[in-house]
Image (cartoon, rainbow, N blue to C red):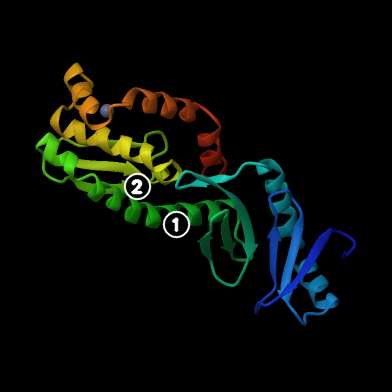
Amino acid sequence: MDGFIDYQIKLMRRKTIGIYILPDGVVEVRAPKRTTRQSIATFVAGNRQWIEQRMALAEQRKGRPFNVFGRPRQVLVELGQRRYIRLSARQLRIVILPGDDDEAMRQQLKAWLLVIARRYLARRLVANLDWCHVLRVDKPELRVRYMRSRWGSCSLSGRVNLSTTLVQLPVEFCDYVIAHELCHLRVFNHSPRFYQLMQVLQPDWRLKREYLKQIETGVEVMQIKSYLHR
Ligand SMILES: [Zn+2]
C-alpha cells in the first residue's frame, strides 16, 4: 500500500515491473523476485494517474470479456516498455506504454486485430475454396479491414471485403459470412436465387443469420464498441 492505491504484489521470474489491472478491478504489481517494497511503491506512485484511469475503465468494463475466435478472453492491460498484445487460451494481454491513453490502446487493438484477421480470414477462404467451384466463380481477391457496422461486403469487380471483427465470432459464423459474400459473386442481390445458393453452401443459414442479428444488437458488439469506439 502506498497510501493512495491498494495493490497486491506478485514476485516472480520476470525482468521488469509490470502493473496489471485485473478484470475485477484489483491492481496487481508483478515484479522480479528481488525487487524491494520501496521500489515497487515508488513505481506505483509514479504511475498513479495511469492506474486511476485504468481502474475507472476497468470498472466500466467489469465482467465484459473480449471474444477472439469465438472464445471469451479476460482483458489484462499492462504498462510495459514496448507495445504488444498476447493472446492465450483465456486472456488477451495488452501491453501499452506509459502515457498511452484509451484511444491509443484502441488503435493498438485494431491494428492487432487487422494482422490476425488477415491471416485467419485468408485461411478460411482457402478452407472453403470448394464453394467457389460449386458457384463457378474464381477465387476472389480478399480485402480485410475494420468495418464498424458490417461483417462483410463485396464489389461488382469480384472483390470480397471482410471485417476484422469477424475474428470475434466462432468459426462457423465467420464461414457463414464468407459463404454469403461468395454467393454475391454469382447473384448480386438478395433474391430467391441468392438464397437457393446459400441453401447449398450453408443449409442452416437461417439460424446463423438470426444469431448474427441478435449479436449485432446485443452484448457482443457492445464489447467491440467498448474497446474500439468512444
Ligand atoms: Zn448480402
Q: Is residue 82 above or below residue 169?
A: below
Residue 184: mark? none
User: What is the secondary structure assignment of the residue under circle 2?
Assistant: strand
The part of the image, by quadrant, that contains residue 119 is bottom left
| Amino acid identity at mark 2 | Arg
Of the residues shown, which amino acid type is indicated by label 1? Answer: Trp
Residue 145 is tagged as: 2
Q: Could you classify mark 1 by the number of other residues whose Cα lies within 10 Å: few (under 14), some (14-19), or many (20 or more)?
A: some
Mark 2 residue crowding within 10 angstroms, few (<14) / some (14–19) / many (20+): some
Residue 158 visible? The answer is no
In the rendered image, the quadrant that contains the C terminus is top right
| Relative to 60, 204 lies left or right | left
Comparing 9 with 207, the one in front is: 207
Seen at 20% across and 32% down, the residue is 183
Rendered location of residue 192, percent (x, y): 20, 17
Q: Quadrant of ligand 1?
A: top left
Mark 1 or mark 2: whose residue is earlier in sequence: 1
According to the image, label 1 marks what residue? 112
Residue with the most extreme left position:
136
Which sits in the foreground, 186 or 72? 72
Instruction: Please provide percent x and percent y for residue 102.
Output: 59, 52
What distance separates the C-alpha of mark 1 from that of mark 2?
Answer: 12 Å
Would you say 133 lies left or right of 51 here?
left
